[in-house]
């Protein structure tokens, strides 16, 4: 990878960190504290949230299209669970063989919206389902991204949308110089405990 591309990737990483910091500072204006996995609001904020909660019966009457499409949305639960089982099983079996560090589920599955008192029970259920589905897709994407880095860390000739975070550091399409050596470097970079001289 040439120096200019490496410099731009570093700048992107720095800007992403700055963005996360700015977003965190903005969120800090809402008074809550995180203790382990529990989110606690100041009592006055919690009381205000509870006053804003919409009664379930009223909520059901405001958006009938949600009731109509509910079976379609929740019908995706079975394929999602099957995907979860498959990618988790694949990782459990193959990653130790490849010596690839495992993807931690807890980094991708976050269920903290249940602490929001302004959501009724149905809204909380929806939020939990969405958190699971999006967390699963991000988790599966990282598992597949590590697999791609292990087997074929080469960019495509055609531009594509939705590339994972590892993709930008892959080898250029058609750049065959020292391919076996560089492929091994990509693999070593993912090892849980890389050899001291190869880290």
Image (spheres, helix red, strand yellow):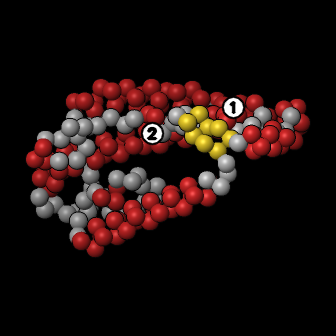
Going from N to C along the chain, the mark reached first, 2 or 1, is: 2
**Residue drawn where x is 17% and y is 48% of the image:** 199
Residue, disc 1:
125
**Residue drawn where x is 40% and y is 29% of the image:** 88
The crowding category of the residue bearing disc 1, from other C-alpha atoms within 10 Å (few below 14, some 14 to 19, many at least 20), is some
| Figure quadrant of residue 110 | top right
Q: CA distance from mark 2 to mark 1?
A: 21 Å
The crowding category of the residue bearing disc 2, from other C-alpha atoms within 10 Å (few below 14, some 14 to 19, many at least 20), is few
Helix, strand or loop under label 1: helix
Q: Is residue 131 visible?
A: no
Q: Residue furthest front?
A: 43
On the picture, is 195 further left or further right than 102?
left
Image coords of residue 47 (percent x, y): 80, 40
Image coords of residue 120 (percent x, y): 78, 34
Q: Which of these two is toward me, 2 or 7?
A: 7
In the drawing, what numbered circle is on residue 107? 2
Helix, strand or loop under label 2: helix
Q: Is residue 171 above or below residue 52?
A: below
Q: Nearer the viewer, mark 2 or mark 1?
A: 2
Image coords of residue 186 (percent x, y): 22, 50
In the drawing, what numbered circle is on residue 25? none
**Residue drawn where x is 46% and y is 34% of the image:** 106
């Amino acid at each position: 990878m040439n120096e200019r591309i490496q410099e731009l990737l570093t700048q992107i990483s720095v800007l992403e960190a700055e963005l996360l910091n700015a977003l965190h500072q903005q969120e800090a204006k809402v008074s809550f504290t995180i203790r382990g996995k529990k989110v606690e609001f100041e009592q006055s904020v919690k009381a205000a949230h509870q006053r804003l909660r919409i009664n379930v019966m009223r909520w059901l009457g405001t958006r009938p299209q949600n009731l109509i499409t509910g079976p379609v949305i929740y019908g995706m639960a079975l394929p999602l669970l099957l995907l979860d089982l498959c990618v988790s099983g694949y990782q459990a079996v193959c990653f130790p063989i490849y010596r690839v560090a495992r993807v931690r589920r807890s980094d991708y599955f976050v269920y903290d919206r249940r602490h929001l008192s302004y959501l009724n029970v149905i809204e909380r259920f929806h939020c939990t389902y969405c958190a699971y589905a999006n967390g699963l897709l991000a988790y599966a994407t990282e598992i597949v991204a590590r697999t791609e880095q292990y087997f074929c860390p080469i960019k495509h000739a055609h531009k594509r949308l939705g590339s994972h975070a590892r993709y930008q550091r892959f080898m250029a399409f058609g750049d065959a110089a020292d391919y076996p050596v560089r492929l091994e470097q990509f693999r070593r970079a993912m090892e849980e405990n890389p050899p001291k001289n190869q880290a």
